[in-house]
C-alpha cells in the first residue's frame, strides 16, 4: 500500500472499510462455526484506523520491519478482525479469508508466524505475552536508531495476567517511549462482566501509577480513534510509554451481539448471519 | 585409552560469561538480558563492554522471555540469563508461544542447573529442564561439560539461527576439553574409544564418566565414552555406531531419569536396535540441600554409580548372549 493512498482516505471511506471488515468477521466466524466475533467487531474501527490511516507500514511483508511501524495483537483470539484488515490492506488475497480456522490454512484460530501469514510477527493467544513482545521490538528499534513506532492491542480481561504488570513496570523505567499500547475496555470476558469475574478498578489510576502517559478514546467512533491515535503519536519520544484506554462495545455493529459477553466466542447460525449482514452494508465486495 | 588431565578447575557458568563477551565482539546484534542475577550468570564482562546492549529486567522472567522474543524482530540475537529453574518451568508458556512456536532466535541461557546448585535446595535445583525444553518443536538443547566447552557452545549458538536452550552450572569442575575446540551443534564428541560398553554422558557427568572409565580399564573393561553435549538434535549416527560395537549402554546425566538424555537414547535404540541400557540419573525425585559432592553421591550421580551401572548392563548383555 502506498503512503499517499493511505493518507488520502476520507472518514467516509474508512467507515466503509470498517463495515466491510465487520461483514468479513461474521462471515468468517460463520464459515467455520467457531471463533470470536464479539471482540473482533468491537476493535474493528481501531484496526482500520491503524492500517489505513495511522501506521507507516509495507504490505510487502518483512519480519524485521525495519523503518516501519509495527503492530502486535496480544489478545490473539480476535484474529478475525486482524486477518480481515490485513487482507483488505493488501498483505494477502481477501479470498484467503474463507480458509479461517480450516485445515491447512495460514489463518489459524489464533495468529501465528508458523504458517507464514504475512503481517504476523509473533504467535498470540495465550494471553498476557504481547506487551512484553512489543516492548522488546521497541527496544530493538531504539538500538537500531529506527524511527518506526510500535503499537500493541490488549484485552481488558487480559490484564488479569501477571506478566502484563511485569511489562507495565518495565516500560516506564526503561523509557520505552516509542510504544503506543491500547487496551480494549469492553468490560466483558468469557465468564461474564470483568467487574464480576475479577474487577480491574481504575485503569487510568493503575497505568498512571506505573508511569505511563494515559489517553482515553471511544473505540467505536472512527473520528475519535484517529484523533487520539494521532495525539498519541505526537506524544511519543518524550520519555514515557503511552497507554490508550479504548472504550468499546463488544459486538459493535451487530445489534444482537452488542454489549454482552455471550458473543465472545460463539458463531452465528445461518439466520443470525443474514440478520447481521443486513445491518452491515458496505458497498464493497465480500470475499 | 586417552588419558585426560587438567591443570585448573572452573565453573561452566564462567565459560558462558567468557563466551558471551566473545560472541558480543563478533556480532553486534548479540544482546543480553538478565533477571536480577548478573553476578551468578557471570554477565559482568559483557555489561562492562557493551552496556547499551544489556537489558536488566528485574525479577520478572516471563517479561524477560517476551522482551527477548520481541527483540529478535529487527535482527537482535538475545541471550537471556537466569537460573535453569526460572529459565524453563517458570516461563514455559512464554517460551512455548512467543519463542518456540514463533521461531524466534532467542538463546535461553540457564545456570545453576541440577543438584550441583547445592545448598539452596530443591526449589532451585531443577531436574526436569532438559525434558521440558526438548519437547518443544524446533528447540535445540545443549548441556556442555566444562568451562571450555561451555564457552565454545555459547559462541556457536550465536551463529545458529533458531531458539536454543543452553544449560550449565555453578560448581567448580575440572577443565579438560581443549580451549581451542570447535563446537559443532548436534555432533557428539568421542572422549574415549572402547569395545565393551558405551557410556553416553552429558554436562558434569562427563568428567565422572572419564574417572569411571579409568577404573573400569583397571578392571579389564573397555568403556567407550561419548560426550553428548547436544541432547537435541541427538547425534543418532554416533550413538548407533557405538552401540553396534559395544552392545550395551549407560547414560549419565544430572537430570531426572524421566525426560532426559537417557530417554532420548532409549527411544532411538528402541526404534533401531533394542539394547540393554542402564540410567545414571536422578530417579524421579526432587533434590535437597547439601554440598554438590554430597548430593551427587547421595543421588547416584558419580563415577562409582557409573561403574555399578556398567557392571549391571554388561551382566544383562551376557545373559542375552547365552
Image (cartoon, coloured by chain):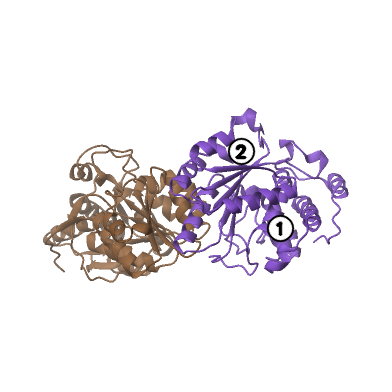
Residue B233 rendering spot, x and y as whole percentages:
41, 63
Image height of A197 relative to A23, above or below: above
Determine the secondary structure under disc 1: helix
The structure residue drawn at horizontal position 58% and vertical position 35%, both measured from the top left corner, is A203
Residue A239 rendering spot, x and y as whole percentages:
48, 49
Rendered-image quadrant of the C terminus of chain B = bottom left
The structure residue drawn at horizontal position 38% and vertical position 60%, both measured from the top left corner, is B31
Which mark identifies residue B200? none
Q: Most extreme residue toward the top, as rendered?
A: A196
Residue B317 rendering spot, x and y as whole percentages:
28, 59
Read off the chain for label 2: A
Quarter of the image for residue A112 reads bottom right
Q: How many marks on residues?
A: 2
Relative side of A19 to A214, left or right = right
According to the colouring, which chain is purple? A
Q: Closest to the observer: A68 or A198?
A: A68
Q: Which residue is mark 2?
A: A157
Q: Closest to the observer: B249 or B166?
A: B166
Q: CA distance from mark 2 to mark 1?
A: 23 Å
Residue B266 rendering spot, x and y as whole percentages:
38, 57
Q: Which residue is mark 1?
A: A85
According to the colouring, which chain is brown? B
Amino acid at each position: 500500500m502506498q503512503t499517499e493512498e493511505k493518507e488520502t482516505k476520507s472518514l467516509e471511506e474508512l467507515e466503509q472499510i470498517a463495515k466491510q471488515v465487520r461483514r468479513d468477521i461474521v462471515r468468517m466466524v460463520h464459515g467455520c462455526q467457531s471463533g470470536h466475533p464479539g471482540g473482533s467487531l468491537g476493535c474493528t474501527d481501531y484496526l482500520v484506523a491503524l492500517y489505513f490511516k495511522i501506521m507507516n507500514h509495507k504490505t510487502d511483508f518483512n519480519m524485521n520491519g525495519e523503518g516501519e511501524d509495527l503492530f502486535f495483537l496480544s489478545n490473539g483470539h480476535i484474529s478475525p478482525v486482524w486477518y480481515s484488515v490485513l487482507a483488505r490492506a493488501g498483505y494477502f488475497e481477501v479470498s484467503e479469508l474463507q480458509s479461517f480456522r480450516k485445515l491447512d490454512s495460514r489463518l489459524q484460530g489464533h495468529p501465528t508466524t508458523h504458517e507464514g501469514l504475512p503481517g504476523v510477527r509473533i504467535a498470540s493467544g495465550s494471553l498476557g505475552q504481547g506487551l512484553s513482545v512489543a516492548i522488546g521490538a521497541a527496544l530493538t528499534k531504539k538500538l537500531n536508531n529506527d524511527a518506526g513506532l510500535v503499537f500493541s492491542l490488549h484485552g481488558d480481561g487480559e490484564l488479569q495476567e501477571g506478566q502484563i504488570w511485569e511489562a507495565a513496570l518495565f516500560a516506564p523505567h526503561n523509557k520505552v517511549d516509542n510504544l503506543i499500547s491500547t487496551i480494549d475496555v469492553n468490560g466483558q470476558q468469557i465468564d461474564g462482566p470483568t467487574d464480576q469475574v475479577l474487577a480491574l478498578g481504575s485503569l487510568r489510576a493503575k497505568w498512571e501509577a506505573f508511569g505511563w502517559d494515559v489517553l482515553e478514546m471511544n473505540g467505536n467512533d472512527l473520528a475519535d480513534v484517529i484523533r487520539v491515535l494521532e495525539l498519541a503519536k505526537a506524544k511519543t519520544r518524550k520519555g514515557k510509554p503511552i497507554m490508550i484506554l479504548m472504550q468499546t462495545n463488544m459486538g459493535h455493529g451487530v445489534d444482537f451481539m452488542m454489549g454482552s459477553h455471550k458473543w465472545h466466542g460463539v458463531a452465528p447460525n445461518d439466520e443470525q448471519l443474514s440478520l447481521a449482514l443486513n445491518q452491515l452494508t458496505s458497498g464493497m465486495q465480500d470475499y | 585409552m586417552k588419558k585426560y588431565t587438567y591443570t585448573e578447575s572452573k565453573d561452566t557458568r564462567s565459560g558462558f560469561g567468557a563466551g558471551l563477551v566473545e560472541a558480543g565482539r563478533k556480532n553486534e546484534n548479540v544482546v543480553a538480558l538478565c533477571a536480577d542475577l548478573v553476578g551468578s550468570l557471570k554477565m559482568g564482562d559483557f555489561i562492562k563492554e557493551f552496556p547499551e546492549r544489556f537489558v536488566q529486567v528485574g525479577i520478572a522472567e516471563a517479561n524477560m522471555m517476551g522482551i527477548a522474543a520481541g527483540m529478535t524482530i529487527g535482527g537482535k540475537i538475545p541471550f537471556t540469563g537466569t537460573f535453569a529453574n526460572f529459565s524453563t518451568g517458570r516461563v514455559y508458556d512464554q517460551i512455548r508461544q512467543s519463542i518456540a512456536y514463533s521461531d524466534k532466535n532467542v538463546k535461553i541461557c540457564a545456570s545453576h542447573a541440577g543438584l550441583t546448585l547445592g545448598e539452596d535446595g530443591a526449589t532451585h535445583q531443577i531436574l526436569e529442564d532438559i525434558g521440558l525444553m526438548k519437547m518443544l518443536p524446533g528447540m535445540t538443547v545443549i548441556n556442555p561439560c566444562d568451562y571450555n566447552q561451555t564457552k565454545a557452545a555459547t559462541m556457536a549458538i550465536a551463529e545458529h539461527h533458531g531458539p536454543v536452550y543452553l544449560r550449565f552450572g555453578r560448581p567448580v569442575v575440572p577443565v579438560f576439553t581443549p580451549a581451542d575446540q570447535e563446537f559443532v551443534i548436534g555432533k557428539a564428541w568421542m572422549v574415549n574409544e572402547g569395545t565393551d560398553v558405551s557410556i553416553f554422558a552429558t554436562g558434569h557427568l562427563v568428567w565422572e564418566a572419564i574417572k569411571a572409565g579409568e577404573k573400569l580399564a583397571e578392571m579389564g573393561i573397555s568403556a567407550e565414552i561419548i560426550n553428548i553435549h547436544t541432547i537435541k538434535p541427538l547425534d543418532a549416527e554416533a550413538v548407533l555406531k557405538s552401540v553396534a560395537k559395544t552392545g550395551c549402554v549407560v547414560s549419565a546425566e544430572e537430570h531426572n531419569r524421566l525426560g532426559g538424555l537417557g530417554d532420548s537414547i532409549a527411544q532411538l535404540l528402541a526404534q533401531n536396535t533394542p539394547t540393554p541400557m542402564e540410567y545414571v540419573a536422578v530417579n524421579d525425585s526432587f533434590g535437597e540441600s547439601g554440598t554438590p559432592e554430597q548430593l551427587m553421591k547421595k543421588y547416584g550421580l558419580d563415577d562409582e554409580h557409573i561403574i555399578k551401572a556398567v557392571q549391571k548392563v554388561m551382566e544383562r548383555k551376557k545373559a542375552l548372549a547365552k
